[in-house]
Image (cartoon, grey):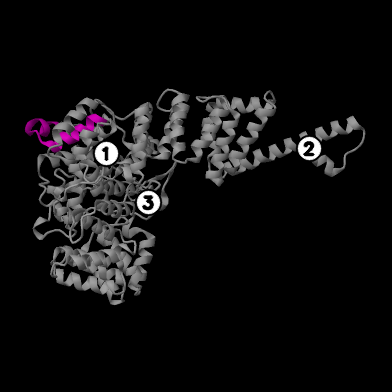
């Protein structure tokens, strides 16, 4: 248990470092003096493509090279990168048939597709077909649930299939086999960094949590509808009317493929060019980057420098970072490390994360400056805390190799994992979200399930939420057909548990509820309390309230009214919206402390037994629109009438005892006492 607790602490600390990756609370990387290590050799970090921001012309990797066996030909058949992926191949034919069966819910067609995938895997040893079989066995989809077989398929497929390598690395990571996990994650992180640096269509993960606690995250989903989003249409209207800021934002969405839009460099350049005519400096910088990358235009470093220089005079501080890079590499200008350092410093002094990252590289490698690993670490930490994936990668390498920082394999594994999740396989997230927005819940669930297997926390929670929310519509499949209710609960429980391990406070809360109420598992108050404590460590007000309740009733925790009150108070401090339930709980606590045998205490204690009997009534009546408000007001009215009657009786008794009527003000004081 202690080992597990330490693992959870490591994962929570690292995976919550930046909300860019998992939408969790941001935490800062803090490296103490003890972590620093002197005496590293300068040639430990030779010049390599990891610092080629724009990529060499001859090093443009295709989708197939970056993510062999990618499902892109199925979901983006018209994209240029899918042309070389041989969609007529038996593997893609079987995969396409399987995806069609998922959407339609046709079990017969699915059986045929699985048989075809089996045949491809057995006949040619195709690693991509083996990877799919690993998923099917791991999740028990039209196959027996067999973790050993799933591991075996992913193990043999990992050499040729990056998604299986991700799944294998995550298996090792969960089991604290960090020495094995770090090697796999290091390879995957390198691919991810290469895809960010050299690919014209480098993926940008924009993780969307489709739920917000128990409810659908309608605001986030609305912002992911691309050109159909009303806000986007308003923005586009403003841009067409000449608003330079709107032009820039639309160009940005198309350039990076944000807000549910597909990448379109031609549209991005068109909007940036229109914004430039209005004097918009940020657009000037991105036009310069487009020419430096050769994204949709012929690569031209001279034009890139001209545009970046124009942007820097506005000023656009991130443009200094691009100019520094051109000088350090000698692209379009004569190589000049002194000028490069000056430009990087201008960017860094104005809180530009790219400037900090590049200064870190210069100090780490001793390029144009005296080598200083401590300064390099300082700059990398600032860049990493701003969400710079390349900075995470450098820190991971330093922890992995022991160069500059003391060797720390668990830390290196977690940082590599963050970077690896930015790889081209993250496109699964976009396809899953698009399917969900099109109301293809089954396909969305399957894609999130695939991502969950690869270790993505957002996908784990999304898949679990779909199971809980949509039930039979989720296309939860077992060995021989659709899942029964108990099996769906068990799968959701497993997914929530994985998300909880990675710092998802809502998942930890639901795990506690599952053990407390016996949803998909046996009732276990001890494990419920453990899960609530984990959620409480993540500052979850509901978990604190639940812990107070368990202390008040001695369920899974010692009976302790003082601790119960402390937890109730903490819940209120953390979430002022919890005032009503906390006040009611404190009232119950006061009654229990001062009138342990009174009628109301017995009523309160009987509620858990009564609850199952009225559960159906609550769903059918209370939760109907309007009924909740009416019944709440009715309950409040009954409570007020009861208290007034009780007050009247007490007053009558006291009046009879002293034979002197109380003054109204005295009456009020007496009632309070």
Residue 281, above or below 388:
below
Circle 1 residues within 10 Å: few <14, some 14–19, many ≥20: some
Of the image marks 1 and 3, the number of the one nearer the N terminus? 3
- Quarter of image, res 196: bottom left
Residue 502 appears in the rendering: no
Could you tell me which secondary element the residue under label 3 belongs to? helix
Residues at discs 1 and 3 in contact (Cβ within 8 Å): no
Of the image marks 3 and 2, the number of the one nearer the N terminus? 3
Q: Is residue 396 left or right of residue 30?
A: left
Is 296 included in the stretch rendered in magenta? no
**For this rendering, which residue is in front, 55 or 356?**
356
Magenta segment:
118-138
- Quarter of image, res 234: bottom left
Residues at discs 2 and 1 in contact (Cβ within 8 Å): no
Quadrant (top left/top right/bottom left/bottom right) for the C terminus? top right
Residues at discs 3 and 2 in contact (Cβ within 8 Å): no
Could you tell me which secondary element the residue under label 1 belongs to? loop
**For this rendering, which residue is in front, 469 or 532?**
532
Residue at numbered disc 2 = 671
The x and y percentages for residue 550 are 53, 28
Is 122 included in the stretch rendered in magenta? yes
Q: Residue at x 50, y 24 (%)?
A: 556
Residue 417 appears in the rendering: yes
- Quarter of image, res 643: top right
Residue at numbered disc 3 = 221
The alpha-carbon separation of the residues under discs 3 and 2 comes to 52 Å
Residue 138, above or below 281:
above
Residue at numbered disc 1 = 408
Residue 90, above or below 64:
above
Tell us which disc is closer to us: 2 or 1.
1
């Amino acid at each position: 248990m202690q080992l597990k607790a330490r693992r959870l602490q490591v994962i929570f600390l690292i995976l919550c470092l930046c909300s860019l990756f998992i939408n969790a609370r941001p935490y800062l990387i803090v490296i103490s003096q003890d972590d620093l290590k002197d005496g590293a050799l300068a040639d430990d970090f030779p010049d390599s493509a990891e610092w080629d921001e724009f990529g060499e012309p001859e090093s443009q990797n295709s989708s197939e090279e970056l993510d062999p066996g990618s499902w892109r030909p199925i979901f983006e058949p018209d994209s240029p990168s899918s042309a070389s992926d041989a969609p007529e191949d038996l593997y893609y034919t079987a995969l396409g048939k399987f995806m069609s069966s998922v959407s339609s819910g046709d079990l017969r067609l699915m059986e045929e597709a699985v048989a075809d995938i089996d045949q491809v895997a057995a006949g040619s040893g195709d690693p991509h077909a083996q990877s799919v079989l690993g998923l099917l066995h791991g999740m028990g989809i039209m196959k027996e649930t067999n973790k050993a077989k799933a591991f075996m398929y992913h193990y043999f497929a990992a050499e040729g299939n990056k998604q299986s390598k991700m799944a294998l690395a995550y298996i090792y990571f969960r089991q604290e086999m960090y020495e094995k996990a770090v090697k796999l994650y290091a390879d995957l992180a390198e691919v991810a960094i290469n895809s960010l640096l050299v690919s014209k269509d480098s993926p940008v993960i924009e993780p969307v949590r489709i739920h917000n606690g128990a409810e659908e995250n309608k605001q986030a989903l609305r912002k992911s509808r691309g050109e159909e989003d009303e806000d986007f249409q308003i923005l586009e209207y403003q841009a067409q009317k000449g608003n330079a800021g709107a032009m820039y934002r639309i160009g940005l969405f198309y350039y990076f493929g944000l807000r549910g839009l597909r990448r379109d460099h031609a549209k991005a350049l068109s909007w940036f060019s229109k914004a430039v005519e209005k004097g918009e400096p940020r657009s000037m910088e991105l036009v310069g980057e487009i020419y430096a990358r050769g994204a949709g235009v012929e690569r031209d470093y001279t034009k890139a420098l001209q545009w970046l220089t124009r942007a820097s005079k506005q000023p656009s501080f991130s443009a200094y970072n691009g100019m520094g890079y051109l000088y350090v590499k000698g692209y379009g200008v004569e190589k000049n490390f002194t000028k490069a350092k000056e430009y990087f410093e201008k960017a860094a002094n104005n809180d530009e994360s790219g400037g900090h990252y590049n200064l870190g590289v210069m100090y780490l490698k001793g390029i144009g400056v005296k080598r200083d690993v401590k300064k390099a670490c300082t700059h990398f930490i600032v860049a990493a805390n701003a969400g710079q994936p390349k900075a995470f990668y450098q820190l991971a390498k330093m922890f992995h190799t022991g160069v500059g920082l003391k060797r720390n394999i668990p830390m290196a594994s977690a940082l590599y994992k963050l970077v690896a999740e930015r790889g081209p396989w993250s496109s699964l997230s976009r396809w899953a979200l698009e399917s969900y927005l099109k109301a293809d819940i089954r396909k969305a669930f399957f894609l999130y399930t695939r991502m969950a297997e690869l270790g993505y926390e957002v996908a784990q929670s999304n898949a679990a939420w779909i199971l809980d929310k949509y039930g039979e519509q989720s296309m939860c499949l077992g060995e021989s057909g659709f899942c029964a209710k108990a099996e769906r609960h068990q799968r959701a429980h497993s997914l929530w548990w994985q998300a909880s391990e990675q710092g998802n406070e809502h998942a930890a809360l639901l795990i506690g509820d599952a053990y407390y109420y016996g949803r998909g598992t046996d009732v276990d108050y001890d494990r419920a309390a453990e899960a609530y404590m984990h959620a409480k460590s993540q500052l979850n007000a509901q978990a604190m309230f639940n812990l107070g309740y368990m202390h008040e009733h001695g369920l899974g925790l010692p009976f302790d009214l003082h601790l119960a009150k402390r937890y109730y108070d903490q819940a209120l401090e953390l979430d002022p919206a919890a005032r009503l339930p906390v006040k009611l709980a404190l009232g119950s606590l006061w009654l229990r402390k001062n009138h342990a045998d009174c009628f109301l205490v017995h009523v309160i204690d009987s509620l858990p037994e009564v609850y199952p009997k009225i559960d159906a009534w609550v769903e059918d009546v209370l939760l109907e629109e309007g009924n909740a408000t009416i019944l709440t007001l009715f309950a409040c009215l009954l409570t007020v009438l009861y208290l007034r009657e009780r007050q009247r009786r007490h007053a009558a008794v006291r009046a009879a005892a002293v034979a002197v009527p109380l003054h109204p003000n005295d009456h009020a004081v007496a009632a309070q006492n």
